[in-house]
Every structure is written in C-alpha cells, then in structure tokens.
C-alpha cells in the first residue's frame, strides 16, 4: 500500500489520534483494528483529493500538541491527547469530523475494508458474534 | 419485417415481467439493460459500497462515472452528481434492477390509495389525483405477482388491507425479540400488527432455497438466491422461450417515431457503438427518471418537446417516499442477528388520520449493519468519539429498536425530471436534471407518523426514544414514481391506464412512472402488478 503522501511522523500521529477516537479498552482500539490501513487505502483511491487536507490536519494536531505540551502528539499521555483533539475539534472542525467519520467507517465496516481486523468491532457489539459465512 | 415484435427498455420490476409475458405469448423481444448481468462480482458484500450505504461507491450500478445527473437543491444550488452521491436519486441498474438489491417488502396498495383526490381533496399546489383504475382492477395482478415472483406473508392478518382472493404462496417470516417487544407496545395502543409480506422465500419456492438469514437483504444481492426479483424469476422465463434477446450494457439513446408519434425503432449504445433495431412496439421500463429522460430525449419535429409531452406532463410529479420513524433504546437486547430482521408492521396510520392527508405504514427495520448503526442510529447529543462513544455502541447496538416507514408523498407538479441543456453523459446523451421538492403536506403527514412511531416505541418499553424531523426535499430514489402518470385526460396525464402514450398506437411506459400517487408503501409489488396487467393487455390486443 502506498503511503508516500504522509510522512512517518504524520502516520504516527494518525495512528495515535485514531486510538483516541476509538480507544483500546477490553477490546481493540481503532489503531490495532487497522484504522490507518483503512484511511490510507481511501486516500489512495476514492479520497485522493483529501490527501493534502489529511497531511495538513495531522500537522495541525502536532502543532497543537507542541504548543500545549511541548511534545509530539504520539508521545503524549492519553488524557493530554484528548485535550489536544478537543482543541482540534473546535479549531479545525471540518478536518476533525472527517477524521472521526473515516475512523468509525473503517472500524465498523466489513473486515475486508481493512479497519476492522478479525471483525473486532462486530464481536464487540454483538453483530455476527459467532461469525458467519458472508 | 421488424427486427423484433417488441423492444423493452429496462429489466427491473416492470421490464422483466413485460418481456416474459410477451415472449411466452410468442413475441420476439429485445430486452435492453444498461447495467450488468452480475453486478460487482469483486466486492458484493462491501458495507461501505452498496445500494444502501454508498459512501464510496455501490454494488449494483449504474457505473459511477458514465451516468451523471444534475441535481437542483431546494435553495436553487445546482450540482453535478454521480450515482452513489446524495441527490442522485439512484435505483440499481443491473439485470433485475432494484429488485436485485431491494429489501423485498411486498405491499399491495390499499383501495384508498387509488382514490387519493376523491378521498382527501386536492391540497393547494399539489397534483394529487385518482388513479384511472381501482384496487379491484389491479387485484388479480397483485395475485399473479405474489405467486409468480414469490411472496411470504400472513394472509388476512392486515385488517386494513383490500380484499384478496388467494392466500400468500409462502408462510410469513419468523418472529424475533424486536417484534415481540413491538407487539407488546401495539397491544397497549390498540394497533393492528402483522408479519411483513416479503418477496423472500421462507421455504423453498420456484426451485430456489429458503432464506439463509444472513441479514444482508437491503442493498445487496441475496447470497442464497432466496430473495425474489425479476432477475431470478421473469427474466429467466423470458430467456427460456428462446424468443427474448437480453443485451446488457445497453444504453438507450432514443426512441424513433413516425410523424404520428408511433414508435418504429430504438437506438442504443453497446460498447460505445450505436445500434438501431426496429420493432412493432416499444416499452419504456427504465424507471421514473430514465423513462422520462428517454421520452424527452426522443423529441422530433413533430413532437418537439419530447414523446408524449404535448401537454408538458412528462417528467412532472416526480415522487418517491419521505421516510420517517423513530429510534429507541430498550432495557434488554432485542437484536438476534437473524435476517431479514423486518418482521412486524402496522397499516393503522395509512389512512383515517384526523386532518391528515394519507399516511404510511410503520415497520421495524432490516438488520442494521454496524456501519449504518454508527451513521444513522445515534441519539441526539451522543459523542461520536472517545471511550464513551465506543462504550455506547458496545452497550446499545443490540438494544436499539427502530420503527420507520414510507410516508405517502403528496405529489408536486414542480418536482420534476427535465433534460439538462448542457451536461451530457459518456455517449453524448443529455442527462436528467432533477428539481423541486415534495409538497409541504407530505412533511405534515410525515411528522404525524414519526410521533406515532415514537409512541409505539415508548409503549413497547423503550427507555429513550428519539426521532428527526423530516425535511422538505425531493424524494424519488429507489421508490421513484409518477413522471408519466396514467389517466383519462391527455392534458393532465401521459398514458392511459395500460401505459399506452395518449394518441399513440405502440409506444408504452410500464414502470413506476405510471403511478399518479405512490401509496404509503414500498411500491415494488404495485409496479409488478401493473406490469402484469399492461403486458396482459398487450398480448390480448395483438391476438
């Protein structure tokens, strides 16, 4: 999968942000379930027009993290990350809403979309908890 | 000699039936379908790219890049839209059309639905009208549709339904915990409820198996071939005669007519090559938007405004259904995961609502895919991200209860299909331009219905109940209808009650375009019944 439109740092930020949108608890969070794979796949296909918006938005997250806590977003504690994301939600609402919706879509869609590895979300909510042939 | 006795354009709920009835009566039929025989073989079960949730694409056509339309929003904003995008008013384009991927609710309209103007009067600004036929005229053909396509249901359980002569051929769907809860609430409110009639095999029928209960009915082709559409009933019957030629990937460009307006031939593109075939009769069954577009695009010097359009009626009264309903959260899980999931309905509110025009059925919903749940079924104010959002989904997916239904649209002559003066499709054919909204009375009715849905959920034990106000917008989509309405007066209708264009010997529209009004019901079975009725007329008059 092509990831060239994001830097390694932006990828780390994306992965960390996805895990605050759907955090891990007794079941997997978005990152472990494949949120970045799903989002990158969209950016390389149907949503290629949004690559720049994503790159810029992820930079904004790191700028906010650096301003508030003097560290990159991925290195912050979860509570600090939430504070940063609340600021992004206020100040960069269009980007943040897109990030949230894409993360949710990947996590709750069929596993072949890449963001719901091993159907973790389906098992969590009780949709096809016993699996299924389709 | 003509190349064919008849050319049928479209293989959906109507076209598949017309082709089979004509071919079985000995006619040589050319059946054109712009979509594919087997839609989306690569990703048939993609939860984000299907006919129900088409965020990034869909799975049953039409092709996303080849078939643009122009949508005019209520505020006048004009945009170019693709088939999977909001505002396009898509219906599937593949063999079987919408019946390939529908949920398969198999409603007969009620007797009052054919007499809306007489029953209610005509609201100012609306084009509410009676049908030129009655429920009794259509009843024998509802019966044919139920038996020849295959419908499951509980005969006699809907006490508001019109009379019927034969029972349903298949037993009703099973109950489930959601239905049990809703039956409890309905009993408190005095609502008559019953199992939803469905074009789904509850037992083996027509040499195809019973439903596998996978729960991916709506928006998807059935993996066990247990959902009954024209693609697995009438189209195979047509082909089995050896007299019907099916051409897929065939985009109709124009119907050719003689100076009197009688059809002589159809031109269509296959693999970007223009073909023309002559025929003794042409039947447009392309759906309410594309049938109207084709007639408008077939203008001649003798019919400069399009075929059947001497009185500016083609394309008007476009209607579908304004959906309304309510959500709730139950104390206990009511989701058992067994498809189809839809199991209980009431027609208590289709008519007889004080100072309301019409109404609509209310029913529980099909199995809600998780991606749909997260998009559509969140209560107001629910956080969309963070641990609380995740916990909400974990706790409430199986507790969420949902009742909804199609409000009978009050038609507006300004809701219409016209031909865009600039934009053309891949083949250079002017595209459909969709504008207008439903009539405001529809919204008043829809609001009435959603409050009934809320009451039903509350009475059923939901601890939290919510709904969203319906919006005044164009409704068409998968239930699109009304654009070539049938009637007795050529000045206010496009065809007679057989779908024959007024003043024309051999040019027909047979699909949802004919519906003067569209009932408070999913219209598929009515489209099928009308197709059986009109097709029977076509073979009788030729003998």
Image: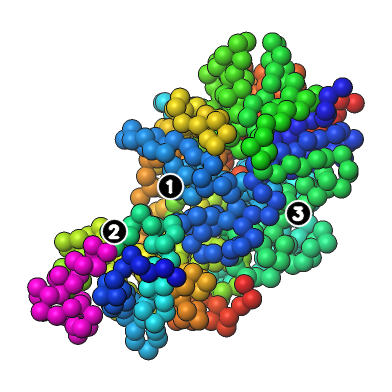
Residue B389 appears at what percent x and percent y?
32, 74
Query: Decide: marks 1, 3 in contact (CB < 8 A)?
Result: no
Spatial CA span between label 2 and label 1: 24 Å
Q: Chain of mark 2?
A: A
Q: Quadrant of residue B308?
A: top right
Callout 2: 10 Å neighbours few (<14), some, many (20+)?
A: few
Q: Which residues are magenta?
A: A55-83
Q: Chain of mark 1?
A: B
Does the magenta segment cover residue B279?
Answer: no
Q: Quadrant of residue B484?
A: top right
Instruction: Say which residue appears at 35% left-offset and 50% top-offset.
Output: B469
Q: Quadrant of residue B251?
A: top right
- Depth check, mark 2 against mark 3: the one in front is 2
Residue B331 appears at what percent x and percent y?
41, 77
Q: In the rendered structure, which disc, 1 or 3, sits on the residue that comes first in sequence?
A: 1
Q: How many marks?
A: 3
Query: Decide: marks 2, 3 in contact (CB < 8 A)?
Result: no
According to the image, label 3 marks what residue? Answer: B232
Q: Residue furthest front?
A: A4
Residue B543 appears at what percent x and percent y?
90, 26
| Quadrant that contains the C terminus of chain A | bottom right
């Amino acid at each position: 999968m092509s990831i060239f439109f994001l830097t390694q740092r932006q990828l780390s930020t994306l992965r960390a942000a996805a895990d605050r949108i759907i955090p891990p608890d007794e079941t997997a969070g978005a990152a472990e379930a494949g949120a970045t794979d799903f989002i990158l796949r969209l950016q390389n296909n149907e949503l290629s027009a949004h690559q720049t918006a994503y790159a810029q938005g992820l930079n904004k997250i790191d700028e906010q993290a650096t301003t508030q806590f003097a560290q990159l977003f991925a290195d912050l504690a979860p509570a600090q990350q939430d504070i940063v994301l609340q600021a992004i939600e206020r100040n960069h609402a269009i980007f943040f809403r897109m990030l949230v919706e894409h993360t949710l879509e990947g996590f709750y869609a069929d596993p072949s979309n890449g963001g719901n590895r091993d159907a973790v979300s389906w098992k969590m909510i009780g949709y096809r908890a016993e699996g299924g042939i389709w | 000699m003509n190349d064919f006795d008849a050319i049928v354009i479209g293989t959906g709920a109507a076209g598949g039936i017309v082709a089979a009835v004509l071919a079985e009566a000995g006619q040589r039929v050319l059946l054109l379908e712009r979509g594919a025989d087997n839609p989306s073989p690569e990703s048939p079960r993609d939860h984000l790219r299907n006919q129900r949730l088409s965020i990034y694409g869909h799975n049953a056509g039409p092709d996303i890049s080849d078939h643009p339309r122009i949508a005019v929003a209520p505020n006048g904003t004009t945009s170019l839209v693709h088939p999977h995008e909001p505002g396009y008013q898509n219906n599937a384009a593949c063999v079987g059309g919408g019946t390939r991927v529908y949920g398969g609710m198999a409603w007969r309209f009620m007797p009052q639905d054919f007499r809306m103007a007489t029953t209610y009067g005509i609201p100012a600004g609306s084009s509410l009208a009676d049908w030129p036929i009655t429920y009794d005229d259509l009843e024998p053909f509802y019966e044919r549709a139920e038996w020849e396509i295959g419908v499951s249901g509980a005969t006699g359980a809907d006490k508001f339904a019109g009379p019927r002569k034969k029972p349903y051929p298949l037993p009703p769907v099973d109950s489930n915990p959601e239905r049990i809860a809703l039956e409890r609430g309905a009993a408190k409110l005095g609502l008559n409820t019953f199992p939803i009639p469905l074009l789904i095999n509850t037992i083996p029928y027509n040499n195809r198996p019973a439903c596998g209960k996978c729960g991916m009915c709506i928006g998807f082709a059935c993996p066990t071939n247990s959902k009954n559409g024209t693609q697995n009933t009438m189209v195979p019957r047509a082909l089995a005669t050896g007299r019907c030629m099916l051409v897929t990937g065939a985009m109709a460009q124009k119907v050719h007519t003689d100076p009197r307006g009688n059809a002589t031939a159809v031109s269509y593109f296959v693999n970007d090559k223009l073909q023309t075939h002559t025929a003794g009769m042409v039947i447009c069954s392309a759906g309410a938007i594309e049938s109207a577009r084709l007639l408008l695009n077939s203008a001649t010097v003798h019919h400069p405004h399009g075929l059947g359009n001497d009185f500016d009626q083609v394309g008007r009264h476009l209607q579908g259904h304004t959906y309304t309903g309510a959500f709730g959260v139950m104390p206990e899980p009511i989701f058992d995961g067994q498809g189809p999931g839809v199991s209980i309905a009431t027609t208590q509110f289709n008519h007889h609502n004080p100072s309301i025009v019409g109404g609509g059925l209310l029913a529980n919903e099909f199995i809600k895919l998780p991606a749909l749940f997260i998009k559509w079924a969140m209560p107001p104010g629910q956080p969309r991200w963070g641990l609380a959002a995740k916990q909400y989904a974990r706790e409430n997916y199986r507790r969420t209860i949902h009742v909804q239904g199609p409000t009978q649209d009050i038609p507006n002559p300004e809701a219409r299909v016209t031909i865009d003066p600039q934009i053309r499709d891949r083949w250079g054919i002017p595209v459909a331009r969709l504008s207008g909204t439903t009539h405001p009375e529809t919204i008043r009715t829809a609001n009435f219905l959603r409050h009934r849905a809320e009451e039903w959920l509350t009475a059923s034990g939901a601890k939290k109940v919510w709904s969203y106000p319906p919006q005044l917008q164009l409704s068409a989509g998968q239930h699109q209808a009304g654009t070539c309405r049938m009637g007795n007066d050529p000045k206010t209708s496009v065809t007679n009650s057989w779908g024959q264009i007024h003043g024309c010997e051999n040019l027909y529209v047979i699909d949802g375009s004919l519906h003067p009004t569209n009932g408070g019901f999913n219209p598929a079975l009515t489209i099928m019944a009308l197709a059986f009725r009109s097709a029977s007329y076509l073979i009788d008059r030729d003998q």
